[in-house]
Image: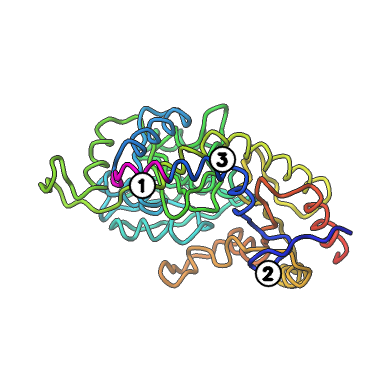
Amino acid sequence: MRLYRKHSAGFTIPVFDLSRQNKIIWNEIETAIHSVINSSDFILGKNVEKFEKEFAHYIGTKYAIGVSSGTDALFLSLKALGIEGKEIITPALSASATGLSILHAGAKPVFVDVKNNGLIDEDKIREKITKNTAAILPVHLYGQPCNMKRLMEISNENSIEIIEDCCQAHGAEFSGKKVGSFGIGCFSFYPTKNLGCFGDGGIITTSDSKLVEKLKLLRNYGWKQKYISDIAGYNMRLDELQAAILLAKIKYLDKWNKKRKSLAKLYDSMLDCGISIRDSVYHLYPIQHKKRDKLKSYLEKSSVGTNIHYPVPLHRQNALKTSQVLPAAEKLCNSILSLPMFPELTEEEVGHVCDLINKLR
């Protein structure tokens, strides 16, 4: 049996390990960082501008606006639409940042149950639409795309906006078109994402030139010219250092996603408790297990890292609590477990994880 190396978090097979990737491309990262430091151009410089153009081209939109995080991408998109006092329909299963961004923007989140793969249940959306509904905010959870055909139909029929939470789905496609190009796309570059920087970062994608101008004002104090605030903007810019790092990494994104898919296929072949996920870029590899907590403890005692995405649905979070009963989301939160998934994970390690799980069963 292979003696797996010890990870800093205490696991021989971590749920995520950025250090392996950093070692492979460190020369490029170091060059990018030194370039910014030597230029002394740290705020909204040439790296941010270049990365915005490259990312927009990658997604298939005319524009991309770099911001300080994925949460801020959602928040600023909502603010730019002027949705204060309105209702935003969103799935009950997501990171709390999805719901909190709606609250902070001055709107009311209206939660919808999910399907067995964790994505918003399109069949349950229409019943939630009222005259006060301003937008649908679907989440491309775990790296899998929502059914954008049906969502766009609902959007067009009711003249409401689509804001895509793409924070886990860099490079995912629906019908040959990348997520983030259907409505307003919101991405996170948190270090663990399929494309991550060395801190917080985010971006908004759109082909609406008027929206772009509003977003640029909102992310930078409302300035059209320096020190003159035309609107009440914020300090939510993508950092120049992070943009340089992302420029060094983006050319590897498709290769990394391909490896994630290969690892997921291997998991699928060895386990029968995976969630039915299709067309995913596998930001995460989640399984369902009736004895999830026992399995989590067993794997961690066997030096395998795991995580739960997510332990509490949004409508049960103290900050977002409603009286709704959404059984599918609640069931997933009680049974779901994320296994190790990152491009540098080896097939041997996946096999070892699967062997452990199958022994417990």
Q: How is the image coloured?
A: rainbow
Name the disc covering residue 10, or none. 2
Mark 2 → mark 3, Cα distance in angstroms = 33 Å
Residue type at mark 1?
Ile
| Residue nearest the observer in this picture, 302 or 240 | 240
Q: Secondary structure at mark 3?
A: loop
Q: Amino acid at mark 3?
A: Pro
Which of the marked residues, 2 or 1, is nearer the chain's N terminus? 2
Looking at the image, is mark 2 or mark 1 nearer the viewer?
1
Q: Position of residue 356 (x, y in %)?
A: 83, 62
Quarter the C terminus occupies: bottom right
Q: Residues within 10 Å of mark 1 (few under 14, many from 20)?
A: few
Residue 147 tag number: none
Give residue 151's position: percent from left, percent from top.
48, 38
Nearest to N terminus: mark 1 or mark 3: 1
Q: Given this view, does label 2 or label 3 mark the residue nearer the observer?
A: 2
- Residue beneath disc 1: 37
Residue picked out by circle 3:
145
Query: In front here: 59 or 144?
Result: 59
The secondary element bearing badge 2 is classed as loop
Element assignment for label 1: helix
Residue 279, placed above or below residue 30:
above
Residue stretch rendered in magenta on the structure: 34-43
Does residue 94 belong to the magenta stretch?
Answer: no
